[in-house]
Image (cartoon, rainbow, N blue to C red):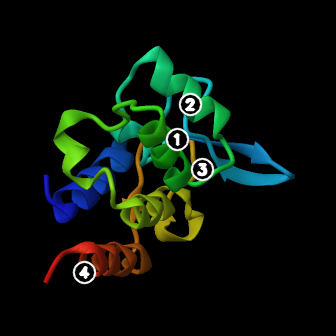
Amino acid sequence: MTIEDIVNETIEFYQTHPRSVGTYNGGISCMYLGPNGDRCAFSRCCVDSPQVNQLLIKSENDRAEWCLNVADADNIQILKDEYIDHVYNSKFWNSLQSLHDSDSIWDEESPQATTRTLNSFGRKKANHIISQHTSK
């Protein structure tokens, strides 16, 4: 998959699935693995195995980059095969995660809503992520 494919797939996914968020320090925060099995933009692309899920739970308040580094050091395949070409692009995964995390880019009733659209600011952000992380 290309960077553009992953970004567009992520947008399409969150138009019909709840974002994986919870409360943290009195505000809304991303959850790699939500209590209802919801996943954030990064963990949605990860292998669903006990070893990877334990790593995601342990790193709940860390960025995707931390997960990738720990998995690499422990020789764990963290990303599903279709995303593996981008395993060393941690800045991309952090950027993709920001699409999931930002309330201001989605038109929705709540993060747990099952229908939402990316607003014009969100589309600009998505296009910026694509251009920033696509090889010229």
The amino acid marked with disc number 2 is: Leu
* Residue 35 position in % (x across, y down): 62, 24
The residue identified by callout 3 is: 110
Horizontal side of 13 relative to 74 (left or right) equals: left
The residue identified by callout 1 is: 70
Q: CA distance from mark 3 to mark 1?
A: 33 Å
The residue identified by callout 2 is: 55
* Residue 42 position in % (x across, y down): 43, 47
Give 67 or 122, whichever is nearer the viewer.
Answer: 67
The image quarter in which residue 127 lies: bottom left
The secondary element bearing badge 4 is classed as helix
Image marks 2 and 1: residues in contact by CB distance under 8 Å: yes
Horizontal side of 84 relative to 117 (left or right) equals: left
What residue is shown at x 39% (from left), y 30% (from top)?
Answer: 76
Count of picture labels: 4
Q: Say whether disc 2 or disc 3 marks the residue closer to the N-terminus.
A: 2
The amino acid marked with disc number 1 is: Val
Q: Say whether disc 3 or disc 1 marks the residue closer to the N-terminus.
A: 1
Number of the front mark, 2 or 1 = 1
Query: Is residue 17 in view?
Result: no
Query: Is residue 68 in view?
Result: yes
Classify 52 as above or below 71: above
The residue identified by callout 4 is: 131
Q: CA distance from mark 2 to mark 1?
A: 8 Å
Number of the front mark, 1 or 4 = 1
* Residue 13 position in % (x across, y down): 31, 45
The secondary element bearing badge 3 is classed as loop
Number of the front mark, 3 or 1 = 1
Q: Say whether disc 1 or disc 4 marks the residue closer to the N-terminus.
A: 1
Q: CA distance from mark 2 to mark 4?
A: 30 Å
* Residue 99 position in % (x across, y down): 45, 62
